[in-house]
Image: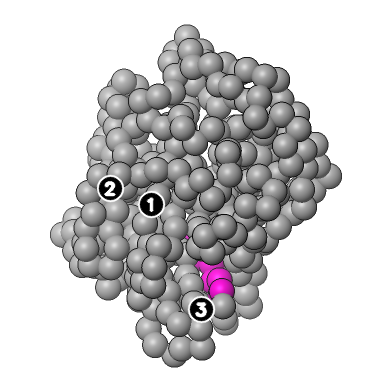
Amino acid sequence: MTSIHRLVGAATTWAILIGVVVACSNDLGRRKTEAHHPPNSLEMAGTTSVANTQTQWDSAAGLAIVLAVDSVPDSVSVIRPEYIEGRYSDTTVIDLRSLAHARFDLFGRNGTFGTAVLATSRFMVPRGSEDGCVQWPTATLPTTKRGWHVALETGHASAIQLDSIEGMSPSDSAIFAAQVTRVVSTLPELRDPVFNNVPFVVRSAYRFQTTVIEGIVASTQRDIPSEATPREEHVFLIAERPVGSSDDYHIVFSTRNAGTEGSTPVTNVLAAVILNQVHRVAIIVSNEYEDGGAVALIERISPRQWRLTWHSAYAGC
């Protein structure tokens, strides 16, 4: 999938379907059906499981979300937020007139990457294929900057820099990895006998800070390398504590995806921002399968309360 990339771990990959547990299947139709389940079907906040929470795009984020296409310079995928699951196919005609010549701020995990002007036609049909694959429509966003992953309309969001475990010193990264695995191990939903005594491995981990909280965003993995049916489990979490506190981090959002090797979606962080109009922290993520994925917005609604507020339709095969 060109519009969303594996950005962490051994393979460089929110976009998404969060919290979907995928069973083993080589049947394309079955995998596509499972992939289209609401991404928060196993959403967890602290010790509370939340099933099928209604999601809706936050208008404070603007009229669209734009994804970089690394394989083609200046090419981007354009996602209109109204095209959620069930409202998007390879015959959908998307009206982009309101976005013609609009300015977009570019965001990545390291912060902001400047602005650029979107060049697009008035109407676009997503690219489809005979095998049922469908991609988001593409446009041009000329920029000399590289390293950004997602863009929102100018003025709607401010960047939050994420400090990656990969950029820390060996000793600091080891301490941070131990902290992440200790936090994730407190989730009661993870007491799956299949994975008992299997250690967590940190795929990606980031620290961030606002004026009121210190936060962690991390993705971990556990594997059972059975020769017959190898299994893996991916846990994505957000945790917070007050700025300057020495208390333990409190998990405020988490998802678990488990299944056979290669069939399990991976959640990746694209950027962290503050939505200027409502002064809310938002994490933009992708959740990716081998042949597609989606994008989502997770917002801090109130202290220790984060929620998946929106997820896009699935794009891919």
- The amino acid type, in three-letter code, at marker 1 is Leu
Q: Mark 3 falls on what kind of element?
A: loop
Residue that mark 2 sits on = 53
- Please tell me whether residue 205 belongs to the stretch shown in magenta: yes
Quadrant housing the C terminus: top left
Residue 212's label in the rendered image is 3
Inter-mark Cα distance, 2 to 3 = 27 Å
- The amino acid type, in three-letter code, at marker 2 is Thr
- Please tell me whether residue 33 belongs to the stretch shown in magenta: no
Of label 1 and label 3, which has the lower sequence position? 3
**First to last magenta residue range:** 203-210
What residue occupies the far left of the structure in this picture? 193
Is residue 255 visible in the rendered image? The answer is yes
- The amino acid type, in three-letter code, at marker 3 is Val
Q: Within 10 angstroms of label 2, few (less than 14), some, or many (20 or more) residues? A: some
5 above or below 167?
above
Magenta: main secondary structure equals strand
209 above or below 43?
below
Residue 308's label in the rendered image is 1
151 above or below 183?
above
Q: Mark 1 falls on what kind of element?
A: strand
Position of residue 123 measured from the top left corner of the image (x, y, whole percent): 62, 17
